């Protein structure tokens, strides 16, 4: 393996998840470093999606910790929305907002969170300004510098979104509704929608499983590009070729446990675990 | 049977010479005012309650809110509108030491009542929206409420617009009971004409016709809205 001077981005510690008393994840521990491309494989129903969805607390873990940027986001008292801004997610069924155009889909979240911040800072300044009137010269509280306006936030987000659309060759689709796109186009828009938030990591749950075969390639191609730019990614997939080519870490999950973890070479060429061998013989057949 | 022509003449006489038309216009205005404002309040209350009733329920506060919302819905769906009007006017207002006109009471009661019905319609609408829409919003760091208001509710409303239209039509027809609390609506107007001409056949026939035309016009309006909403879906 390469010299790991990388910093830990997500540290999963003894993660457990049960649904109605049924244990689906049974003590998962794994560290995900900045720049890692982690591919998660395993039989259907083994807990891969649940694992991925616990990483950004779409499912609340019932035990263990998810340390993200030094904060345990599995703790129910943290404001999860703030952390999710830095974790993108791409779904099997795309989940583009049906009532928004392609451009609006990409712009919505960046504009919303920036406007939220802007309003919060404006409120803070107004309050501090008021309080400063009653404070002595030495005790004056500094204002939060506000450099953006509503219009500039919108403008910037629009430009970013258009650039992203150009990158995937869908600039001409900016103003159409998602229902008019093909599956491959939808998924590529979904990927750039999460890129627009400048996340530190993107989680993919079987991003090509709902696609017609001829559209799988274009989506994988975009994912490879994003990976090469240094994005940290966690990908649940059955695309073993993709795993071999792009991943630097492969996790084999079965029965809610990581039964084997290693480089693609270790996992695909020299598997040790019996169930992994059985699984590979089925999917690679 | 006394000639219908004579009855009609009689009606016209009261209608024009005794300012019956003023009463009718006032009644029509009140009927529309109560229905529109009631619907508006109902939509606000109904949407709020519907959201409360689909909140994830593993915390205490949502559970309490949900209990209150359920009680509210059962209360208003379990008693007739007339009874609610009477209770509001003759029990609640005196107890609170407040005064309101019959029309104001009717607006509030119609709002509260339709809020209960609309909440159920809206809840169905929300549940009909793909849960993936909420997930995508939350995964991007938007809050439950933001995603609800910006993504889920607009899609829900589109799905339930025909049902909401029916609810509005029902509301218009139900305004015919507001005279119980002294609001002058169409019924009061035509009753006035009838009492003055000692003849009720024509006034009530005309009243029925006005209700019918109103409902038909509103149905057309709703169809139009549905069509334009559906078109925005296909825009290319
Ligand atoms: N929301 C849920 N409620 C109850 N059981 C669930 C839920 N989500 C997943 N499960 C169960 O957890 C197990 C693992 O599911 P999942 O993580 O989706 O597996 P995979 O993605 O590997 O196919 C399955 O047995 C599934 O039935
Ligand atoms: Mg899955």
Image (spheres, rainbow, N blue to C red):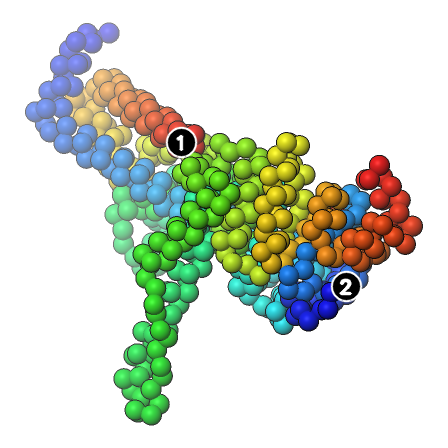
Q: Which mark is residue B235?
A: 1
Looking at the rendered image, the quarter that the C terminus of chain B falls into is: top left
Residue A175 at least partly seen: yes
Residue situated in front as seen by the camera: B209 or B205:
B209
Quadrant in which residue A114 is drawn: bottom left
Could you tell me which residue is drawn at 53 percent across and 63 percent down?
A82
User: In the rendering, at what x and y percent does residue A33 appear?
Assistant: 67, 65
Looking at the rendered image, the quarter that the N terminus of chain B falls into is: top left
**Quick one: SS at disc 2?**
loop
Residue situated in front as seen by the camera: B154 or A109:
A109
**Quick one: SS at disc 1?**
loop
Residue situated in front as seen by the camera: B209 or A55:
A55
Residue A65 at least partly seen: no
Quadrant in which residue B230 is drawn: top left
User: In the rendering, at what x and y percent does residue A49 appear?
Assistant: 70, 49
Q: Is residue A46 left or right of residue B176?
A: right
Could you tell me which residue is drawn at 23 percent across and 32 percent down?
B28
Confirm or deny contact between disc 2 and disc 1 (CB under 8 A). Answer: no
Q: Which residue is mark 2?
A: A1
Q: Is residue B218 left or right of residue B71?
A: left
User: In the rendering, at what x and y percent does residue A77 appear?
Assistant: 60, 68
- Chain letter behind tag 2: A
Between circles 2 and 1, the one closer to the viewer is: 2
User: In the rendering, at what x and y percent does residue B96 appear?
Assistant: 35, 59
Residue farthest along the left direction in this orientation = B17
Could you tell me which residue is drawn at 78 percent across and 57 percent down?
A263
Instruction: Examine the rendered structure and indicate whether residue A73 appears above or below residue A132.
Output: above
Could you tell me which residue is drawn at 73 percent across and 69 percent down?
A3
């Amino acid at each position: 393996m390469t010299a790991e001077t990388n910093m830990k981005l997500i540290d999963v510690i003894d993660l457990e998840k049960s649904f109605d008393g049924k244990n689906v994840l049974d003590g998962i521990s794994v560290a995900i470093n900045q720049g890692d491309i982690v591919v998660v494989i395993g039989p259907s129903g083994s807990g891969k999606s649940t694992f991925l969805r616990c990483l950004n607390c779409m499912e609340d873990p019932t035990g263990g910790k998810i340390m993200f940027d030094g904060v345990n986001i599995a703790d129910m008292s943290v404001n999860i929305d703030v952390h999710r801004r830095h974790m993108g997610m791409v779904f099997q069924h795309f989940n583009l907002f049906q009532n928004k155009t392609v451009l609006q889909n990409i712009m919505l979240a960046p504009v919303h969170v920036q406007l939220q911040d802007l309003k919060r800072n404006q409120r803070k300044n107004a309050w501090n300004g008021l309080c400063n009137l009653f404070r002595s010269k030495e005790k004056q509280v500094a204002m939060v510098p506000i450099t953006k306006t509503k219009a500039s936030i919108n403008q910037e987000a629009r430009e970013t979104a258009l650039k992203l659309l150009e990158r995937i060759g869908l600039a001409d689709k900016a103003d159409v509704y998602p229902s008019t796109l093909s599956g491959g186009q939808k998924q590529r828009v979904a990927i750039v929608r999460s890129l627009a938030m400048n996340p530190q990591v993107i989680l993919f749950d079987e991003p090509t499983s709902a696609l017609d075969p001829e559209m799988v390639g274009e989506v994988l191609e975009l994912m490879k590009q994003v990976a090469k730019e240094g994005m940290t990614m966690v990908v649940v997939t059955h695309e073993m070729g993709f795993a071999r080519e792009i991943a630097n870490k492969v996790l084999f999950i079965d029965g809610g446990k990581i039964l084997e973890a290693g480089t693609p070479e270790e996992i695909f060429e020299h598997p040790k675990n019996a169930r992994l061998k059985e699984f590979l013989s089925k999917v690679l057949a | 049977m006394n000639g219908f022509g004579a009855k009609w003449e009689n009606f016209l006489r009261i209608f024009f010479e005794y300012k019956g038309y003023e009463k009718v216009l006032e009644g029509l205005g009140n009927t529309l005012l109560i229905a529109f404002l009631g619907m508006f309040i109902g939509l606000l209350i109904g949407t709020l309650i519907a959201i409360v009733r689909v909140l994830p329920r593993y915390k205490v506060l949502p559970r309490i809110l949900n209990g209150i919302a359920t009680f509210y819905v059962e209360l208003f769906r379990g008693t007739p509108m007339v009874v609610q009007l009477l209770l509001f006017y003759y029990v609640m207002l005196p107890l609170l030491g407040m005064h309101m006109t019959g029309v104001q009471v009717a607006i509030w009661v119609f709002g509260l009542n339709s809020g209960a019905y609309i909440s159920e319609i809206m809840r169905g609408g929300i549940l009909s929206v793909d849960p993936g829409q909420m997930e995508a919003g939350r995964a991007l760091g938007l809050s439950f409420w933001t995603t609800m208001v910006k993504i889920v509710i607009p899609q829900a409303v589109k799905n339930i617009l025909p049902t909401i239209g029916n609810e509005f039509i029902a509301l218009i027809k139900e305004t015919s009971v507001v005279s119980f609390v002294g609001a002058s609506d169409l019924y009061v107007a035509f009753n006035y004409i009838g009492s003055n001409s000692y003849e009720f056949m024509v006034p009530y026939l005309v009243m029925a016709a006005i209700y019918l035309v109103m409902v038909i016009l509103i149905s057309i309006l709703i169809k139009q809205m549905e069509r334009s909403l559906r078109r925005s879906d296909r825009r290319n």
